[in-house]
């Protein structure tokens, strides 16, 4: 389970201020990379996301809190993660060639793909901090984390 992305989504959902234009541009680049080159996550995309988070003090504080909570979990129940339907509902004209959900060979791959899809749609939206608030899975996950 990729706790970096989940912690980012939870922190973004709590962000009270809008992201800057440069942050939105970086998020769009992250979405493009995640969509086109998902296997480059560790070498390119994750460092880019972590730099964007680190450069935003408020986002970074919340990210660190959620990251430590998520890292302490062994597993996250699948019902707490976004569904294909939930992701489709937030698309709002965002360009995602097609949802990459598939019958996974292993559960973690399927969950990671759905989370990636959520990040791609959110990051490509005009208002990522508002789009993430439309997802119900973030509230369920926060309640689970306590």
Image (cartoon, rainbow, N blue to C red):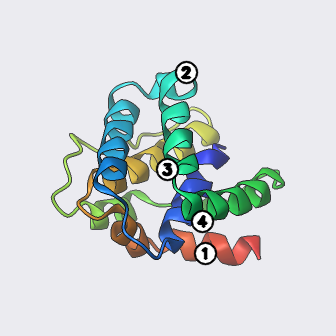
> Along the polypeptide, which appears first: circle 3 or circle 2?
2
Q: Are marks 3 and 4 in contact (CB under 8 Å)?
A: no
Separation of residues labelled 3 and 4 (CA atoms): 13 Å
| Residue 13 image offset from top left, x and y in percent | 49, 69
Residue 115's label in the rendered image is 3
Q: Residue at x 74, y 56 (%)?
A: 70
| In-front residue for pair 123/134 | 123
Foreground disc of the pair 4, 1: 1
Separation of residues labelled 4 and 2 (CA atoms): 30 Å
> Along the polypeptide, which appears first: circle 1 or circle 2?
2
> Along the polypeptide, which appears first: circle 1 or circle 3?
3
Q: Identify the residue position indicated by label 4 in the image.
A: 79
Q: Identify the residue position indicated by label 2 in the image.
A: 43
| Residue 44 image offset from top left, x and y in percent | 49, 24
| Residue 85 image offset from top left, x and y in percent | 36, 63
> Along the polypeptide, which appears first: circle 4 or circle 2?
2
Dot 1 lies on which element?
A: helix
């Amino acid at each position: 389970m990729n706790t970096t992305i989940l912690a980012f989504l939870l922190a973004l959902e709590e962000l009270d201020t809008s992201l800057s234009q440069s942050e939105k541009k970086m998020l769009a680049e992250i979405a493009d990379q995640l969509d086109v080159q998902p296997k480059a996550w560790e070498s390119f995309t994750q460092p880019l996301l972590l730099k964007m988070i680190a450069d935003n003090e408020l986002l970074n504080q919340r990210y660190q809190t959620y990251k430590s909570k998520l890292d302490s979990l062994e597993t996250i129940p699948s019902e707490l993660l976004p569904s294909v339907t939930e992701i489709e509902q937030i698309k709002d004209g965002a360009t995602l060639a097609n949802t990459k959900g598939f019958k996974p060979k292993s559960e973690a791959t399927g969950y990671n793909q759905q989370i990636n899809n959520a990040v791609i749609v959110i990051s490509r939206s005009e208002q990522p901090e508002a789009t993430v608030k439309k997802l119900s899975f973030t509230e369920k996950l926060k309640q689970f984390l306590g």
